[in-house]
Amino acid sequence: MIFLGVGRGGALGGGVPIAAELVKTYAFDLGAWPPWAAVLAGTLLLVLAIWITMKILKWTLWLLLFLVLIGGVLWSMWLLLG
């Protein structure tokens, strides 16, 4: 941000910001793996992610189907009796 006036140092006396101290980086080095093993591992992980997404979508669609069915039946009964 831009402030007018004299700038002051931070709480650490102008040292490293706190955010820089809290950053952690995780990396997987697949350089030592044979190329076929890296491709196979990536393929299996992607297939697992797609399978989990399909299961979640399946349950979500079943839930939506029953909610629409129950809601429509209750609404038609409301209109019939009201």
Image (tube, helix red, strand yellow):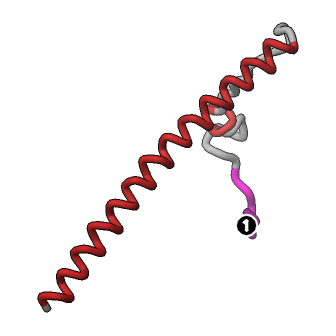
Rate crowding at label 1 as few (under 14), some (14 to 19) or many (20 or more) other CA atoms within 10 Å. few
**Camera-side residue of 3 and 45:** 45
Q: Which residues are magenta?
A: 1-8
Q: Position of residue 41 (x, y in %)?
A: 72, 18
Query: Quarter holding the N terminus?
Result: bottom right
Front residue of 44/17: it is 44
Q: Residue 25 in the image: x percent, y percent?
A: 70, 27
Looking at the image, which residue is at 18% across and 84% down? 78
Magenta stretch: helix, strand or loop mostly: loop
In the displayed structure, 51 sits above or below 63; it is above
Q: Which residue is mark 1?
A: 3
Q: Position of residue 46 (x, y in %)?
A: 68, 31
Amino acid type of the residue tagged 1 in the rendering: Phe
Residue lying furthest left:
81
The percent coordinates of residue 40 (x first, y second) are 76, 18
The magenta stretch spans residue 7: yes
Image position of 54 with respect to 43: above or below:
below
* Secondary structure state at the residue bearing disc 1: loop
